[in-house]
Image (cartoon, grey):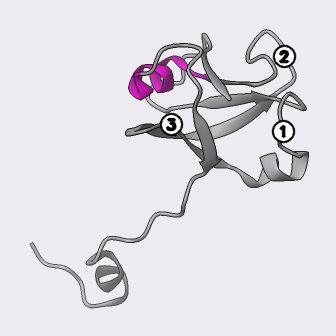
């Protein structure tokens, strides 16, 4: 899939948009992908995914990135990228202990 910059200011968040029915994903697959990882090589970002019906945003075979997301990814428009569901973040080592353990003192 190719990336395309779309004129959506979602500061400070990244945002990705796909055209409904404009790619190889089935509707149930798209709905399951609330947040996606988009990238090529070492360049990658995480972004919430919005599904749109407006063909002027991303065309079939494209994923549109809001201004911040496009700038942060740092790749040129039209580059091929991979898209996958973002993996769930693992808690930091001390996070669970401070939530379920005694109060943390500073």
Chain part drawn in magenta: 65-74
For the residues labelled 2 and 1, the Cα–Cα distance comes to 18 Å
Q: Earlier in the sequence, mark 2 or mark 1?
A: 1
Is 17 displayed left or right of 102 in the figure? right
Q: Quadrant of the C terminus?
A: bottom left
Is 49 displayed left or right of 103 in the figure? right
Q: Which residue is mark 3?
A: 39
Q: Which residue is mark 2?
A: 54
Q: Which residue is mark 1?
A: 24
- Residue 74, labelled with which disc? none
Q: Quadrant of the N terminus?
A: top right
Taking depth in this image into account, of 84 and 28 the one nearest to the observer is 84
Instruction: Give the x, y percent position of residue 27.
Output: 89, 45
Q: Earlier in the sequence, mark 2 or mark 3?
A: 3
Regarding mark 1 in the picture, which secondary structure is present there? Answer: loop
Regarding mark 3 in the picture, which secondary structure is present there? Answer: strand
68 part of magenta stretch: yes
């Amino acid at each position: 899939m190719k990336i395309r910059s779309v004129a959506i200011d979602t500061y400070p968040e990244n945002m990705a948009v796909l055209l409904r029915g404009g790619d190889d994903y089935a509707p149930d697959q798209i709905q399951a992908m609330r947040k996606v990882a988009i990238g090529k090589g070492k360049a990658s970002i995480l972004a919430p995914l919005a599904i749109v019906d407006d063909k002027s945003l991303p065309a079939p075979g494209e994923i549109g990135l809001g201004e911040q997301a496009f700038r942060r990814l740092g790749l040129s428009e039209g580059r091929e990228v991979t898209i996958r569901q973002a993996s769930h973040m693992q808690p930091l080592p001390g996070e669970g202990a401070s939530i379920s353990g005694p109060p943390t003192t500073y």
